[in-house]
Image (spheres, rainbow, N blue to C red):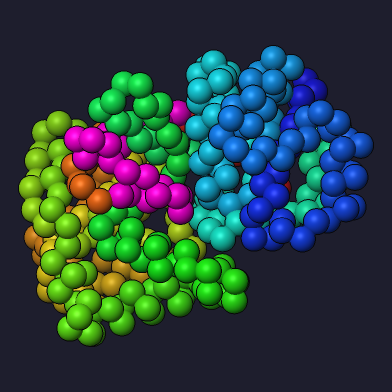
Amino acid sequence: MNQNIALIKNPVSRLNQKEDKEFTDFALNWLGENYSTPRTVDDMMQTLNRFVATGVDCIIIDGGDGTISHVMTAIYSCYPHDKLPSLIILPSGNTNLIAKDIGFGIRGINALKRIRTLAERQRLHFMVQHRHALKIEWSDPSRPPVLGMFQGAAAFTKAIQIAHNPTILKNFPHDGAVAITIITSLLKLFFSKTRDLWLNGNACSFFIDEKKSYQENCFLFLSTTLQSLSHGMWPFFNRYAGDDSLHYLNVKARPPHLLAACFALLRGKTPEWLLNDPNYLSGTANKIKLSIKEDIILDGEQFDTGEDHCILLSTGPKFSFVRL
């Protein structure tokens, strides 16, 4: 069965800011009106509604994690939930965790040529991996949910605000920017002016699958539906809980042995002492109700937690990703 393919390109993603005329010409000649560069949320919704109407069942996303999150959110709003299109990622953003988890081979015009060849040979459906989205919902019923794959709060929000510093984004490639952010964040803990602000954490409460509840100051909270991260990092205790799981990590305020824990988790290791330390809580869940006044981060994008400062995290719809 031939697939109806479309392409959504974020023209302001880090690797797309310099126009590639050869790529654009090829995309327009191949896809015509199915080649889109939406710049606003309204543009994205109009684009996805048009794709639904014309029967698009495979969408190429040329952008980073934030772009993928926006596209998945619009798909969830526009498409029937039992007929979601498959996705192909061409990573070009400041953060590309999703692409690195799914796996990708090439990008640019060579990727488009390969996709067209595989589509003509009806072989795209042989190269599919599946991942659940992470869904965030608010108590306000008029506010639509958003989808992504990696969420963070407390110290993570502070760190991302550092990473979004124009000096870092302009002068360092992605991996360099991440390294500079981690180093800068850790340095904050060595200066009295910022150490207490970071280590004291943020007031937080969360309910896991409506069974366990925790109320405490939180230094760091993370959750994801990804199955791997870059460079072997894995700050969660259970890597093999199944692809339906929402992994989470909660680190209490003023945690002991923080540097040793960071060193272990950033290498994907979970020593016995860390498993038994009540200041570090990690596991899997289907739903987590999180209450925190400060903004949270989803795939690099910042969101408030609403008037009641409460959000619901859950495993969202399952997407099919074509790996080139």
Q: Main secondary structure of the magenta part?
A: strand
Q: Residue drawn at (9%, 41%), measured in percent from left and top?
A: 213
The image shows residue 77, relative to residue 129, as above or below, that is above
Q: Can residue 268 be seen?
A: no
The structure residue drawn at horizontal position 31% and vertical position 82%, both measured from the top left corner, is 187
**Where is the N terminus found, in terms of image quarters?**
top right
Q: Is residue 145 above or below residue 208?
A: above
The answer to if 301 sits in the magenta stretch is yes
Residue ID at (27%, 63%): 155
* Residue 289 in the image, given as x and y percentages of width and height: 21, 36
Q: Position of residue 165 (x, y in %)?
A: 47, 68
Residue at 53% x, 74% y is 167
Q: Is residue 99 in the magenta section?
A: no
Q: Quadrant of residue 40?
A: top right
Which segment is the magenta one? 295-317
Pick whichever, 201 or 263, lies toward us: 201
Q: Which picture quadrant has residue 243? A: top left
